Amino acid sequence: MSGMDVWIGLLGSVLVAGAAYSKRSLTVSGAAAAVVLGTLMYSLGSAAWFGTLIAFFVASTLLSKYKHKRKAAIESGYAKSGNRDAGQVAANGGLGLLLCIGSVIAPHPAWWAAFVGVMAAVTADTWATEIGGLSRTAPRSILTGRKVAPGTSGGVTALGLLATCAGGLFIGAAAWLLARLGSGAVTGASDAAAAVAAASGRQAAAVLTAGAQPPLETLLPLLAAGLAGGLAGSLSDSLIGAKWQAMYRCAVCGRDIERGSHCGSPAEPLRGFAWMTNDAVNVIGSLFGGAAALAAALLAGWL
């Protein structure tokens, strides 16, 4: 990490967060958290780590504004809206930052695989919510298969599942494009190969050391990691949301909602654990997404 990297990361993060704040996509706390997160991601990682995070944020923000009026009634029951606060920023990007830090401490392509899975999970979940909310067919509970009201936690639609896949593939493609900035600079594969070559002299390690592009910086493996992470993260998010997330019932309109108040009145606790908030569910879904991408990479022999 150099002083120049810190300044570049800071400038880029301020520009993106400032633009998002001006469009009311971030609160003050959300903008501040985004600046800190982005600066650290760029200065500790690379343009690819930072760029993949920005790809998620920009694409998801644009989707949240698409047909916003049509989705407004559904979103009124969500714990968080498209105007992200610091908690949402941390829930969506905090785990990715920890993986970036891990790649600095002990360089290995596994960190990059998990990171792509985490970013794919939060992207797929956001796309499923934003696009799935426009479905003309009623969602069905992921637990029972029965029809539920639009906006119900754990409700899924065919359109939402397609959006989930699209979001995961989008992150995989973005990660691939950004990784082309420099082989080995993203995954740490060059450093790992050099260490193996020095210890054992294996031919495969020597090839990597000579500059061959690591598998997790090529298109198909990253698309697979993105798809696996997106599906696992989004579906686990829906499952946890349907079974354990804190839910309430509005005392005025009778809707089941994620927040403790609605229609200007306190809502009644319905089910779930009080600590299992929307942000907590997002973090757990991200963990599943990162684990799925890592597992896919291991099973395919890319690590």
Image (cartoon, rainbow, N blue to C red):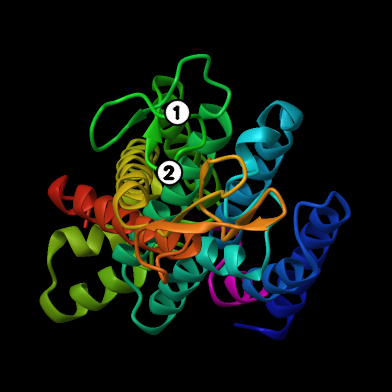
**260 relative to 234 in the view: left or right:** right
Residue at (40% x, 29% y) in the render: 148
**Drawn side of residue 49 relative to residue 281, left or right:** right
Q: Quadrant of the C terminus?
A: bottom left
Q: CA distance from mark 2 to mark 1?
A: 13 Å
Q: Nearer the viewer, mark 2 or mark 1?
A: 2
User: Which mark is on residue 186?
Assistant: none
Q: Position of residue 114 (x, y in %)?
A: 34, 60
> What numbered label is drawn on residue 160?
1
Regarding mark 2 in the picture, which secondary structure is present there?
loop
Nearest to the observer: residue 139 or residue 64? 139
* Up/down of 297 relative to 198, above or below: above
Q: Which amino acid type corresponds to the residue marked 2 in the rendered image? A: Ser
Question: For the residue labelled by badge 1, is the local secondary structure a helix, a strand or a loop?
Answer: helix
Q: Nearer the viewer, residue 302 or 75?
A: 75
Asked whether residue 44 is drawn in magenta, I would say yes
Asked if residue 5 is positioned above or below residue 230 in the image, the reply reads below
Which residue in the rendered view is the most extreme toward the right?
Answer: 22
Our reading of the magenta stretch's main secondary structure is helix
Q: Is residue 169 above or below residue 86?
A: above
| Amino acid type at mark 1 | Gly
Label 1 CA crowd tier, 10 Å (few <14, some 14–19, many 20+) = many
Relative to residue 3, is residue 211 depicted above or below? above
Label total for image: 2
Magenta highlight range: 39-48
Q: Residue 70: percent from the left, percent from the top? A: 70, 26
Which residue bears the numbered disc 2?
153
